[in-house]
């Protein structure tokens, strides 16, 4: 990676962070506005808003960390996809459930993928110092875990092929972007030295 590319990303990073936190704030305002003027039956409690704020805040903070530590756009975009998959899986599962209702035990398989992704990315970050190749392997492992979750849910009699397929494609896209990121001395590697 050339110094010009690193400098270009360094100038772009503050804008990415502003867009990230603005997007998080906008995402939180959607249920606020919907509860004020939304359809009948959209009645969030105070606890629902706290849950939303915490979930959105954690996802935004993790992504902000990755954007700050990355030195190239592929690494930042790969991180955004991975965090996005985890956030959306968690959000959909908690709100309405991916299969059945939110209290359906089969949905635990999808929570398991989120937990697996956190552990896999954490291990790649700590053990391999956030090296893009290690992160790429972690994302491929997440795609495999996603397929396993889809198969588990299918054996229980539920259909989640489309959700599983979309997530697998996104995990693999994240892996491909991590592989395109520069390796030695770039991205999160500098953080864990």
Image: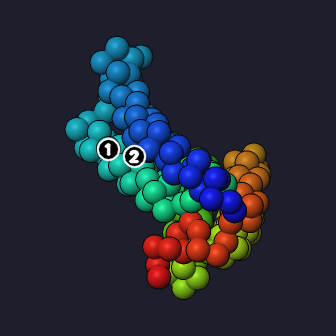
Q: Is there any visible trace of residue 104 in the rendered image? A: no
**Residue annotated with mark 2:** 56
Residue 83 in the image: above or below residue 21: below
**Residue annotated with mark 1:** 53
Toward the bottom, the furthest residue is 127
Position of residue 169 measured from the top left corner of the image (x, y, whole percent): 76, 53
Q: Is there any visible trace of residue 47 in the rendered image? A: yes
Q: Is residue 97 left or right of residue 174?
A: left
Q: Within the image, what quadrant is residue 152 found in?
A: bottom right
Q: Is residue 154 left or right of residue 10?
A: right
| CA distance for labels 2 and 1 | 5 Å
Residue 114 in the image: above or below residue 93: below
The label on residue 147 is none
Neighbour tally class for label 2: few under 14, some 14-19, many 20 plus, Cα within 10 Å: some
Query: Which of the pair 35/143 is nearer the observer?
Result: 143
Which residue is depicted at the point 47% across and 82% down?
193
Contact check, label 2 and label 1, Cβ < 8 Å: yes
Q: Is residue 53 left or right of residue 16?
A: left
Q: Tag 1, which secondary structure? A: helix
Neighbour tally class for label 1: few under 14, some 14-19, many 20 plus, Cα within 10 Å: some
Position of residue 124 measured from the top left corner of the image (x, y, whole percent): 58, 77
Q: Tag 2, which secondary structure? A: helix
Protein image colouring: rainbow
State which quarter of the image contains the N terminus: bottom right
Residue 157 in the image: above or below residue 21: below
Query: Which of the pair 77/116 is nearer the observer?
Result: 77
Position of residue 62 measured from the top left corner of the image (x, y, whole percent): 44, 58
Toward the left, the furthest residue is 46
Q: Is residue 108 left or right of residue 169?
A: left
């Amino acid at each position: 990676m050339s110094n010009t590319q690193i400098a270009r990303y360094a100038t772009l990073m503050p804008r990415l962070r502003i867009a990230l936190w603005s997007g998080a704030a906008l995402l939180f305002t959607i249920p606020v506005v919907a509860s004020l003027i939304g359809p009948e039956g959209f009645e969030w409690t105070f606890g629902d808003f706290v849950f939303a704020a915490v979930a959105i805040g954690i996802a935004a903070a993790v992504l902000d960390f990755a954007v700050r530590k990355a030195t190239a756009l592929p690494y930042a975009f790969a991180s955004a996809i991975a965090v996005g998959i985890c956030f959306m899986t968690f959000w959909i599962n908690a709100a309405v459930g991916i299969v059945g209702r939110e209290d359906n035990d089969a949905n635990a398989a999808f929570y398991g993928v989120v937990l697996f992704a956190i552990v896999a990315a954490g291990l790649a970050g700590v053990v391999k110092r956030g090296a893009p190749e290690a992160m790429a392997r972690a994302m491929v492992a997440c795609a495999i875990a996603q397929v396993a979750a889809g198969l588990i849910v299918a054996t229980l009699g539920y259909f989640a092929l489309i959700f599983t397929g979309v997530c697998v494609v996104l995990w693999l896209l994240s892996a491909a972007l991590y592989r395109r990121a520069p390796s030695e001395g770039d991205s999160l590697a500098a953080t864990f030295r």
